Amino acid sequence: MSNMGTSISGPLRPPFVLQRAFIETPFERRFLSIVRHAWQERSWHVISAVPGSGKSLGIGELVRTSGAYKDKTGAPYLPVLAVCSPKNNAQAPALGEELASAFGVVPSMPWKRLRIWLVQAMAAFQVECIIIDDAHDLNRFTLSFLKELTDKLAAFPYKRLVGLCLVTAHSGDVIPLKEIIKQPDEIWRQFYRRMDKLHPFCVVDGHTQDEIVEILPNFEDLYRSQLPDLRLRRWAPYIYEQLTNPILDLDSSRRVTMDNLTKFVTIALGHAYDRGERDVNGQILKETAELLIQHRDDPFHIDGDAALFHIDGDSTNEELPPEQAVG
């Protein structure tokens, strides 16, 4: 009779567990410094970075630590209001509903009344900064509504200036929304006049090799319980070179996104753990690089249940990455 829970060698090894934690990377410090400036100075910015940089994670952490509360009388304080832009060329009502949802409720009322309610709610909740994530999906109608909303907050009786961060993804040298905001029409001249005088359009760069060296010990701390001898920092030069391959670094920026770094590290650590290793090695890192770069777009055939997500590759003729010490 078979024993489904044990083998000859003892109990089954528990599966590799992915750890979820916010890491304050150099990118996050750069990105959040701009957002905090907008919050403090009530300034307006378009803030752009390549997809996978960590913009949404940074926004979530800022909201979590922003100090929102209700006092003893029940009066609310929501200093940072963050929403994701509606998609598919949405009109102003769709953005209005997204903003209303940040207060925990979308009132059932006509759009004409909801516009007024939003101004009242933002004043009552003491909103100091509005953040729109995925703002590249905004258009002239939703941008115009944001101007109307903030104009009414700034006017009597509220007299409340708010910061505005339009957080976008970009590729190449094109900054989303700039083409709309820099139009000569009077409404856009007014919009642009409200933007920060020195840095209205900001591009936040990804990570350098030295910054990868700084980040990797965070993964060591997160996964030490599963890989007791884990030492990732020594592999920073090799990991950086793999992640700046043109297949992953589409703009040839020689910068690394946190999304790619996290995928590379966690895949490698999972393979090491599954093989019973206590640390990663050059062979595992090379296989991970092949998986993410050479075989990423290969069709993956799933048949049977014996080797799900196991990739076989012939790499016997390729040189293993050297173990590169980082001082």
Image (tube, rainbow, N blue to C red):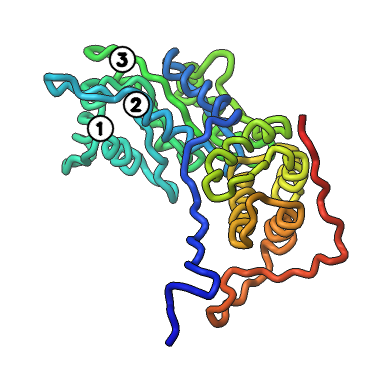
Q: Position of residue 106 (x, y in %)?
A: 22, 41
Near mark 1 (Cα within 10 A), the count class, few <14, some 14-19 or many ≥20, is: some
| C-alpha distance separating marks 3 and 1 | 16 Å
Classify residue 320 as left or right of residue 177. Answer: right
Near mark 3 (Cα within 10 A), the count class, few <14, some 14-19 or many ≥20, is: some
Type of the residue with mark 2: Glu
The residue under the point 53% across, 79% down is 305
Q: Quadrant of residue 205?
A: top right
| C-alpha distance separating marks 3 and 2 | 13 Å
Q: Position of residue 299 (x, y in %)?
A: 65, 72
Assess whether mark 1 and mark 3 are in contact (beta carbons under 8 angstroms): no
Type of the residue with mark 1: Arg
- Helix, strand or loop at mark 2: helix
The residue under the point 58% across, 41% down is 219
Near mark 2 (Cα within 10 A), the count class, few <14, some 14-19 or many ≥20, is: some
Which residue is at the far bottom? 1
Dot 3 corresponds to which residue?
A: 160
| Res. 148 mark | 2
Q: Quadrant of residue 103?
A: top left
Type of the residue with mark 3: Arg
| C-alpha distance separating marks 1 and 2 | 9 Å
Instruction: Look at the image and tell me in which quarter the N terminus lies.
Output: bottom left
